[in-house]
Image (cartoon, rainbow, N blue to C red):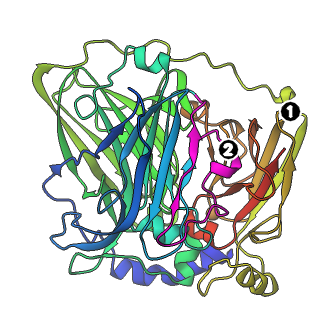
Amino acid sequence: MNRRGFLKASGAGILMAGGGLAWAQGTPRPLPLIPMTDVTGGIDARIPLTLGPGTHDFGTGAASRTLGINQGYLGPVIRAKQGQTLPFDVSNGIGDVTTLHWHGLHIPGDVDGGPHQEIADGGTWSPDVPIVQHASMNWFHPHMHGKTAQQTYHGLAGVLLIEDEASLSADLPKTYGVDDFTLVLQDKMFDESGQMTYTLSAEVFEDGFEGDTLVVNGALAPVAQTVPTGLVRLRILNACNARFLDLSMETRPITVIASDGGFLSSPVEAASILMSPGERYEILVDMSAFETNALTVDFSGGGGFLASLFGGNQAQTALTLTRAAEKGFTGSMPKSLATLAPPKRSDATVTRSFALQMDVGADLSALALAWENVCGTAGAMAINGLPMKMDRIDETVRKGDTEIWRISVDDQLHPFHIHGCSFRILSQSGAEPPAYAQGWKDMVHVEEGWSEVLVRFDYDAPTEAPYMYHCHILEHEDCGMMGQFTVT
Ligand SMILES: [Cu+2]
């Protein structure tokens, strides 16, 4: 039995005794519509993003102490267009140092918002962020080394939708809050009084922090929305710290139109989609065919242990859709979405290997602590034998080169993320990736065998502003499962 297996088995009794969801599924609440900042029509002033403390009632009846961006919990949905430069003023009032990383954007290292672009408490960071890439769903969250997990969990996360000429003129639903919805999915833990909690232990570091309660846009699931007849578009972000989510529709299958970095070549039907923390997928639901429908989230997705404990069924309803009489989007399911050639292995001139390690031993754990990795009482984690170190560059990449990155793990399922790019998945845990993951991605799942991605880096990331690659289980990232690379 491996280390994780042993820890899990010894904890099983406690889990069994306390089994069941603390905040069980009840009557649906209205789906909260996240406020949108839409600058596609033009930008005439800097865009303020103010990070600060707040309070928020998730629906438990109690006000939880949270963090938010321009509001008490979570941040806005920003909608921008390819070709624009976004002049952000990111003001930090959270009472601690932080950073704000634009996850998914193809931008140079000095505006990436990684751990080197610290914003002191009370300070403001004013990057001009160029939007060069195609239509895609991206997001932003803190990336302060050692503090990413707790700051993101408490609510510092927002969505950045990029449109382009093709997406703006595409025959797709695009009326926000009517037939086009953004869903931020998270798992939370609450105490008996209904306050959100976040507590860490060695075992929590092993898995990353997993809550027992699903929330959607900051509201306890299930949430409900009435929609017009026709196609409805759901843009979905897994903003959990650590939990993989298995998504399906009540009226199977689920129809996927876009992944992290943009549209698929054509809609893909799948029985379910497994979303890691940090991943985004867009789906279409045909509400002309059904009077009601529901998006279901299975918490046992990617796990295995909880699945075996609870019979593999931890399915919860995230969102129920009810059809109204009026017509909405009148188009039909698109046949094709984007031009997307298959990735060519032979384009690569460099191959790099990355071994993600959960268990590095006591000596390296002491070093990891000195390098400001945060592991609580757990041992440090590493990539290629080394925990994260802020003043060490692990890889140097030549700008414009196409590379194959091969990622492996010593234990468990991890979501691997690379900054400053989108890539294509060549293989995932030794197998062909599911069809819905064969488009543009910046996240890849790694379990057994290798996962391989084909990637090209086109923007500068110098020594003083390198890019990160890391596990997107945020507690693993804080604990050293991260490295740095330059592009020059
Ligand atoms: Cu990990």
Q: Which residues are magenta?
A: 104-133
Look at mark 2 in the image and give the residue it sits on: 420
Is 387 on the left or on the right of 168, as rendered? right
Look at mark 1 in the image and give the residue it sits on: 348
Viewer-nearest of discs 2 and 1:
2
Indicate the position of residue 238 as horizontal and vertical percent values: 45, 50
Look at the magenta stretch and give its main secondary structure.
Answer: loop
| Distance of label 2 from label 1 (alpha carbons) | 18 Å
* Of pointers 2 and 1, the one earlier in the residue sequence: 1
Q: Which element type, helix, strand or loop, lies under badge 2?
A: loop
In this view, the residue farthest toward the right is 349
Please state which amino acid type lies under the numbered disc 1. Ala
Which quadrant of the figure shows ligand 1?
bottom right
Is 250 on the left or on the right of 84, as rendered? left
Q: Quadrant of residue 376?
A: bottom right
Q: Which element type, helix, strand or loop, lies under badge 1?
A: loop
Along the line of sight, which residue is nearer the eye, 181 or 277? Answer: 181
Q: Quadrant of residue 478?
A: bottom right
Indicate the position of residue 297 as horizontal and vertical percent values: 36, 50
Residue 344 lies, with reference to residue 107, above or below; the image says above
